[in-house]
Amino acid sequence: MERNLTQIALFAALIAALGLIPKFSLASGVPISAQSLGIMLCGTVLGAKRGTLAVLLFLGLVALGLPLLAGGRGGLGVFSGVTVGYLAGFVAGAFVTGLLAQMWRGRGGWILPSVAALVGGVVVMNILGIIGMAWKLDKTLAEATVLALPFVPGDLLKCVLAGLITQALQKARPGLLQA
Ligand SMILES: O=C(O)CCCC[C@@H]1SC[C@@H]2NC(=O)N[C@@H]21
């Protein structure tokens, strides 16, 4: 129990730390951000339940006003901005990544954790992000999808990184990863 809480807090802190890497702002207002790597790792390393709780803790701190989002943003206002779909995607993405990672735990080296991150941290997260952009920017889903295309190369790289980091942690600290 205590160990779980520590790990949840640690991964919430990891997402926050990735927010210190400068974001690259695009015309849509949704930045290229390293924080989605943290979301993927929450799922691949902690699994669905603990990973989702870590993301909820992170977003709870953001809602309280802590400037933990990339570029030093925080407060309730961010939940009504153009990235609201992505913020919902942070939660759903960690959950789906975690479910798949748990199902495939210990198999496939770095590839299966990467595929889990691809499905949860790229497909699910971007679907919600695109819906949010379409809503907030008054665009069609097709137009919003075009706006999300610049994220794809970086997001694919993050999937590979998430798989490699997860495999390394599996070897170094097997107790951290849930079956
Ligand atoms: O800071 C925020 O308010 C959320 C930013 C979300 C950015 C999304 S995460 C998935 C996709 N990949 C990126 O690099 N940026 C977007």
Image (cartoon, rainbow, N blue to C red):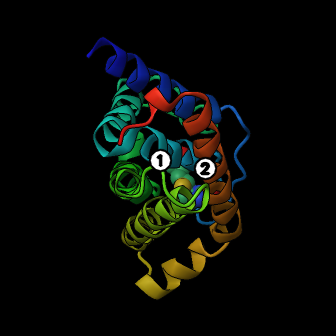
Residue 30 seen? no
Instruction: Tell me which numbered mark, 1 or 2, is placed earlier along the sequence.
Output: 1
Image quarter in which the N terminus is found: top left
Above or below: residue 167 compared with residue 112: above
Above or below: residue 35 compared with residue 131: above
Would residue 28 be found to the left or right of residue 161 on screen? left
- Residue marked by disc 2: 162
Residue 51 image offset from top left, x and y in percent: 37, 39
Residue positioned 42% across, 83% down in the render = 141
- Residue marked by disc 1: 44
In front of the other: 126 or 68: 126
In front of the other: 119 or 154: 119
Image quarter in which the C terminus is found: top left
Would residue 163 be found to the left or right of residue 3 on screen? right
Above or below: residue 78 compared with residue 148: above
* Distance in Å between CA atoms under marks 1 and 2: 7 Å
Task: Say which amino acid is labelled 1.
Answer: Thr
Task: Say which amino acid is labelled 2.
Answer: Ala
Residue 13 image offset from top left, x and y in percent: 52, 24
Residue 75 image offset from top left, x and y in percent: 41, 31
